[in-house]
Image (spheres, coloured by chain):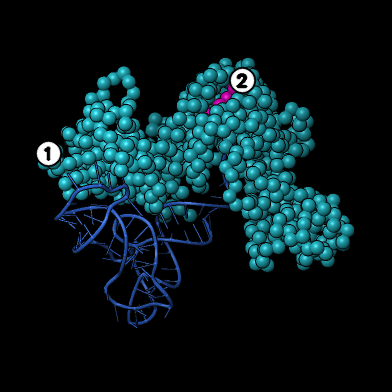
Chain colours: A cyan, B blue
Amino acid sequence: MLPNGIDFTQKTHYCGAVTSEQVNQNIKLTGWVGKRRDHGGLIFIDLRDRSGLIQLVFDQRQGIELFNLAESLRSEYVVAVEGEVLRRSEETINRSLPTGEVEVQVSKMKILNTSKTPPFYIEDNINVDENLRLRYRYLDLRRPEMLKRLQVRHRAVKLLRDYMDRFDFLEVETPMLTRSTPEGARDFLVPSRMHSGSFYALPQSPQIFKQLLMVSGLERYFQIARCFRDEDLRADRQPEFTQVDIETSFFCTDDLFALTEGLIAELWKEFFGVEINKPFIRIPYRDVMNRFGTDKPDLRYGLELVDLNDLAQKSEFKVFKTALEGGGTVKGLRVPGGKSLSRKDLDDLTLRARQLGAKGLAWTFVEEDGWRSPISKFFDQSLIEAINSRMEAESGDVLLFVADSWETTCQVLGSLRSYFAPQGLSIKPHFLWVVDFPLFYFNREEQRYDSNHHPFTAPRVEDMNLLESDPLAVRSQAYDLVLNGVEIGGGSMRIHDSATQARIFQKLGLSEEESNEKFGFLLEALSYGTPPHGGIALGLDRLVALLTGDESIRQVIPFPKTATANCLMTGAPSAVSTKQLDELKIKLQTDNDKE
RNA sequence: GGAGCUGUGGUGUAGUUGGUUAACAUAUCGGCCUGUCAAGCCGAAGACCGCGGGUUCGAGUCCCGUCAGCUCCGCCA
C-alpha cells in the first residue's frame, strides 16, 4: 500500500505490494513495462515499479482497442493502468514472485511514455561491462538490486541519525567551500571569481570545523559529511565519499568506543539480525603489527607472525645476524601444510617479498628429521628444534622468515599472511579497535616528521616527555575501527590547548609564522575555553557495502566515478569556456609551456 | 608516475600455428499462437573486430603507439 494521508490519484498501490488481500478490488498502478509475453490473443506484461513486479493480463476478448494498445507496449514503456485484481488459478500461481498468487486484469491503460530499447537488461544478476552501467547509470539504478542498495543506504543512514539523536547529538552542516590546508591529501581546488588568484578547497573532511563546534559548546555533533580528496583511486576509494562524522566533548575514549560499538551493533542487528559481542577487543598498534603485520588485521584466521630475534641471534645465518646488528627484526610465518608448495611457488613468494621492500625471503620445509632448506646448514639441531617449537611447526609445514627493519619485516610477513588466508572465510564479524598509534612517522621524502593521523591528534600524556628525545616513540590517542581486515573508521582525542598544539606544529616543521598563517584561527580558538574533545569518522560507503555484501563501494554510491575520476554519464570533468576562465582570470598552460 | 588484465553485432561470448563468407546465444523487428512468467515456433535485419600506425601476398589474430575500463604499487587516513 502507498503511505496514507493523501489520496494519490495516479496509483493506489505499489506493484510489488499487490497480494490476495486485494482480490476483486479495482486498483490503479503505474510503472515500467518489463517482460512481455505475447500469446496472440492473450498478453502478459510484467509491470515493475520501485517495489517489485506484478503480472498484468490483456485478453483480446475483453476489447480489441485496449488489446491493440497492449500489443504496442515495449520494454521500459511507462504506463498507468487500472484494473481488477484476480486470484490466479492454482496451476498458474508463480511461487517465485511475492505477487504470484494474483494478477491484474487491465480495464484501462494509458501509455505515459515510450522508451528506446535499453542497452542492457533491466533486471538483477546481469553480466555487462561496468563501463556501460556507469554510462547509463540511471538505467542501472532502475534494476531492482540497485534500488535495493539505495534503500539499504537510506535505512542505514536513517538508523544512525535516529541513534545519534537518541544520544543528544546535533547534526550540523559545515562548509564545502573552505580553506586549503597543507596537511594530508591533495585538495580539490575551486577558483574564486571575486578574489582572482585565490582558491577555496573542498573539504578532505570537516575536521577543523567539528573541533570548532566543540569550542562553540555543541558538545555532541555529527554529520553525514561529503569529503573530497584529489588522490589516485582504488577499488574502495572515490574522489568524493561520505563519512559519518562524529565529535564529542567531555567524552573519554571509552565513552566514544561504547557509543560507536552501540551504533555498529544496531546496524548489524537491523541488517543481519545478529547480536554483536561488546565491547570490541582492543590491541595496541605495536602488537597488531607484531602479530599480524598490518594495522588492519583480519582476525578470522590465525597465522600469526612469530618473533625470533633471540633465536635468530644464535644462528650462523649472516642475513639474520646482519639485520639484528642493524637494529632490525627477524620474524617467521608458519604455513601449515606448506609442503605442497613448489620451488616456483617459493620463488614467487620471494619475488613478492622483494617487491614489498624486503631484501629476500628465507624458507624451510619442516620434516620429521629436521629442516630441508638452503639455509638449514646455518642452524644446529637444537636451534631448529627451538624455532620449530616456538612456531608450533609440524612436519609438512613450511616456515617463512624475513629479517629486515621492524616495519619491513612486519609488513612483508603480514602481506604473506593474508596471501595464505584460508578460502571461504565466514562473514562473521570480528571487530577490533587498534589503539596507541605512533603520533608521528618520519617522512623520508620531506626529511621531517609527519602526523600519522592528523596534526590535531592528542599525544598520550605520559609520552609527552619523549617529544624531543624520541618523537617516533610518542604514542597518540588515535584509534581505528577494523572489521575483518577492513578499516571502517578512525579518530582520536584532540589537542585542546593552544600551547600543546603549537608544540606539535613546531615538531611537524611548521614555523610559527606558517602555523599562524595556516591555523592561526584554530590556535586562537583553542585559547578561548576549549573543552577536552575527540571524535571518530566512519566510512559510510564502505559500511553500506558491508551491509549489502558488495566488494566495491561503487555499488552503493548512486553516481560513482571511475578509477581515473571520470563520470562516464555526465562526462565530468570537462573543458570550460574561455569566458568562464576569463572571469576567473585563469590561463591554461599549454603543453609547450611545460618544461 | 609505474605494472598487469580487458576491449569482436544492442548485450554476453567464440574465433585454432595469421588464410579469404567473423560463429553462437540473447535482445531487436516481422509473422503465427489464449495461461505464460528465462513463454514457444518460423523468418529478417544487425559488426569496417576500441582508435592510429607497422610487419605481411594476406591481420580480429603478430609488433608499436594511443584511448577507455578494471586491479595493484607509489599516493591517500
> Looking at the picture, which amino acid does disc 2 mark?
Ser
User: What x and y, as percent, mark residue A249?
Assistant: 61, 20
Please tell me in which quadrant of the rendered image residue A559 appears. Answer: top left
Q: Secondary structure at mark 2?
A: strand
Which quadrant holds the N terminus of chain A?
A: top left
Return the residue at label 1. Answer: A63
Q: Is residue A515 visible?
A: no
- Subunit bearing disc 1: A
User: What x and y, as percent, mark residue A63?
Assistant: 12, 39
Would residue A31 appear left or right of A469 to someone viewing this image?
left
> Looking at the picture, which amino acid does disc 1 mark?
Gly
Q: Is residue A574 magenta?
A: no
- Subunit bearing disc 2: A
Question: Label 1, label 2: how many angstroms apart (C-alpha)?
Answer: 71 Å
Please tell me in which quadrant of the rendered image residue A260 appears. Answer: top right
Q: Which residues are magenta?
A: A244-249
Return the residue at label 2. Answer: A249
Q: Nearer the viewer, residue A83 or B23?
A: A83
In percent of the image, x 66 and y 60: which residue is there? A349
In percent of the image, x 61 and y 29: which residue is there? A261
The dot on residue A485 is: none
Q: Is residue A246 magenta?
A: yes
Q: Identify whether A398 is placed above or below A37.
A: below
User: What x and y, as percent, mark residue A483?
Assistant: 60, 39
